[in-house]
Image (cartoon, grey):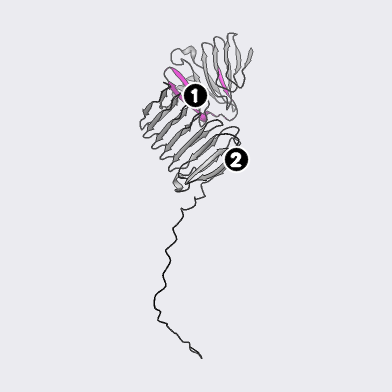
């Protein structure tokens, strides 16, 4: 059995050798396998891979930290997409629904659990997938259902009235407005503006994601920082009523609007890849300054009042 290993960058792996073990590793990789009973190794942080497997009885083995309940199964066109919840990791299995030989027959986890292809298909989520890939500046309006937005390029404007949505943006300066629901934002490169008006939301921010602006109202919300960003890398400052979170040594920053003017506009937690947390949930922002009362003018004439005691007094 052949063992094929990729790099931590972008790889194109083509295998004609029969039964193989393929570990593409990190990076957004393309894997083409034309024969054999193959095993694909996939770990947290391995990126966004595309697979085309045309035969045999195959299996994906998921590494530590990926449990069955972490997988989200979605259909897009004839492809079968496996997303790892609350991460940017995903596997796009090409033409799954056009030919049964293109399917991956089993998914296995470190605890020994196995999910078959038929079981995975039975767990398909009904999210609508919206792909914006023109490269121009598009305007898109969603629905009150659950959408997954893939924003491939251009400076786009998205308005969504509700639902538990996922936004995955690439390059461009995008403007996203979401009115309700528990949403997940992956703004990626560019200077993006996100306005979220309700729900318990998670914003994912990685190195080189640019200079983003967040207006968040309501709910219990989290910014999840990716690898290479620790507590000590943050420089937090105040600009007007806004909180500015800068990543030291980079131009990356997040501006959180109205943080200091309304407790509903805070992001309650900052979560880091090492498991540490900055919790702002119990700290109310300082109240806005109160104008001092006007000075009291003394009366123009005073009539004294004298009160004696029960003893010997001198007035």
Tell me if 191 is positioned left or right of 233 in this view. Answer: left
The quarter of the picture where residue 9 lies is top right
- Would you say residue 70 sits in the magenta stretch? yes
Return the x and y of residue 153 as percentages of the image width and height. 45, 24
Q: Is 69 or 139 nearer to us in this picture?
A: 139
Q: Is 248 or 60 nearer to us in this picture?
A: 248
Q: How many numbered marks, from 0 up?
A: 2
> What numbered label is drawn on residue 82?
1
Q: Are marks 2 and 1 in contact (CB under 8 Å)?
A: no
Q: Is 2 or 175 nearer to us in this picture?
A: 175
Give the crowd class for mark 2: few <14, some 14-19, many >=20 residues within 10 Å: some
The residue most toward the bottom is 312
The residue segment tinted magenta is 55-81
Residue named by callout 2:
231
Q: Is residue 47 above or below residue 259?
A: above
Residue pictured at 62% horizontal, 40% vertical: 232
Among the two numbered marks 2 and 1 on one chain, the one whose residue lies closer to the N terminus = 1
Return the x and y of residue 206 as percentages of the image width and height. 55, 32
Q: Is residue 199 above or below residue 2?
A: below
- Would you say residue 76 sits in the magenta stretch? yes
Return the x and y of residue 150 as percentages of the image width and height. 44, 25
Tell me if 278 is positioned left or right of 220 in this view. Answer: right
């Amino acid at each position: 059995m052949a063992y094929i290993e990729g790099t931590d960058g972008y790889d194109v792996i083509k295998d004609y050798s029969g039964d193989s073990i393929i570990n593409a590793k990190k990076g957004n990789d393309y894997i083409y396998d034309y024969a054999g009973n193959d095993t694909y190794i996939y770990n947290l942080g391995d990126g966004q891979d595309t697979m085309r497997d045309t035969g045999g009885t195959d299996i994906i083995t998921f590494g530590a930290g990926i449990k069955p309940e972490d997988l989200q199964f979605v259909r897009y066109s004839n492809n079968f997409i496996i997303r790892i919840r609350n991460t940017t990791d995903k596997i796009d299995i090409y033409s799954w629904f056009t030919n049964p030989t293109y399917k991956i027959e089993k998914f296995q986890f470190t605890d020994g659990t196995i999910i078959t292809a038929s079981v995975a298909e039975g767990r398909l989520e009904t999210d609508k997938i919206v792909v914006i890939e023109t490269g121009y500046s598009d305007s898109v309006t969603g629905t009150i259902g659950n959408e997954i937005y893939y924003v491939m390029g251009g400076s786009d404007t998205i308005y969504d009235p509700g639902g538990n949505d996922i936004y995955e943006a690439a390059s461009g300066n995008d403007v996203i407005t979401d009115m309700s629901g528990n949403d997940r934002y992956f703004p990626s490169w560019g200077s993006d503006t996100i306005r979220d008006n309700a729900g318990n939301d998670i914003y994912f921010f990685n190195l080189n994601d640019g200079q983003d602006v967040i207006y968040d109202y309501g709910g219990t919300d989290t910014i999840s920082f990716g690898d290479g960003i620790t507590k000590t890398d943050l420089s937090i400052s105040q600009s007007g009523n806004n909180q500015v979170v800068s990543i030291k040594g980079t131009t990356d920053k997040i501006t959180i609007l109205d943080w200091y003017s309304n407790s509903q506009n805070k992001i309650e937690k900052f979560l880091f890849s090492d498991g540490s947390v900055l919790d702002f949930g119990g700290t109310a922002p300082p109240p806005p300054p109160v104008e001092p009362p006007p000075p009291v003018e003394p009366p123009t004439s005073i009539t004294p009042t004298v009160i004696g005691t029960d003893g010997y007094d001198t007035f």
